[in-house]
Amino acid sequence: MTKRILIFGTFDGFHAGHQFVVEEAAKKGSELVAAVARDAHVRALKHKEPHNDEQTRLARVAKDPHVSRAMLSDEELGSYRILDEVQPDLIVLGFDQLALRDDLERWMQEHDRNIPIETLAVFQKK
């Protein structure tokens, strides 16, 4: 049986922390879907321009052998239509995605959805 895992991220300048999230999330299921943040969301949430545009970031994430499918996140911030499209069994977040976790939990409560969310430990550089 397939267990589909969903991760979210900007993935700008794909670094060791991103690789850690991808690898750890992939261990939790048989299919890993990565949702890459839209450029407009990076501007709105991080108040800066991404170094790489969304298509470049998407292509980089899609190349990772642990990622079954990479896709751009919803055009409308906070709509979470991606949850209906992907139908994840588990959402895995990085340790620093607390605001996203809170927003996902709020949205799920409002929409009578219950998808487990797991937050990974802090990445430790070796």
Image: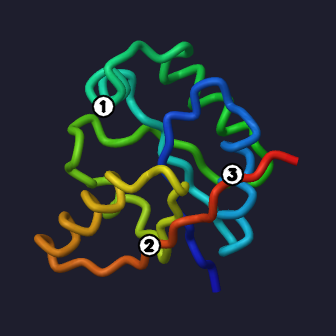
Q: Amino acid at mark 1?
A: Leu
Residue 121 lies left or right of residue 65; in this view the side is left
Mark 2 or mark 3, earlier in chain: 3
Query: Circle 1 is placed at which residue position?
Result: 45
Q: Measure the C-alpha gap from mark 3 to mark 1.
A: 25 Å
Residue located at (46% from left, 70% from top): 88
Q: Is residue 77 left or right of residue 3?
A: left
At x 26%, y 26%, the residue is 44
Q: Furthest residue to the right?
A: 126
Q: Secondary structure at mark 2?
A: strand
Locate residue 52, reporting x and y percent: 56, 15
Q: Residue at position x 72%, y 33% from top?
A: 15
Question: x, y (%) of residue 115?
Answer: 37, 77
Type of residue at label 2? Ile
Q: Assess disc 1: are there few (<14), some (14-19) or many (≥20) residues with their C-alpha within 10 Å of its C-alpha.
A: few
- The residue tagged 3 is 67
Horizontal side of residue 3 vs 14, given as left or right: left
The label nearer to you, 3 versus 1, is 1
| Dot placed on the residue nearer the N-terminal end, 1 or 2 | 1
Query: Of the numbered discs in the image, which one, if any, rests on residue 99?
Result: none
**Element assignment for label 1:** helix
Q: Which mark is residue 117?
A: 2
Image height of 106 relative to 66, above or below: below
Contact between marks 1 and 2 (CB within 8 A): the answer is no
- 71 vs 36, nearest the viewer: 36
Confirm or deny contact between disc 2 and disc 3 (CB under 8 A). Answer: no
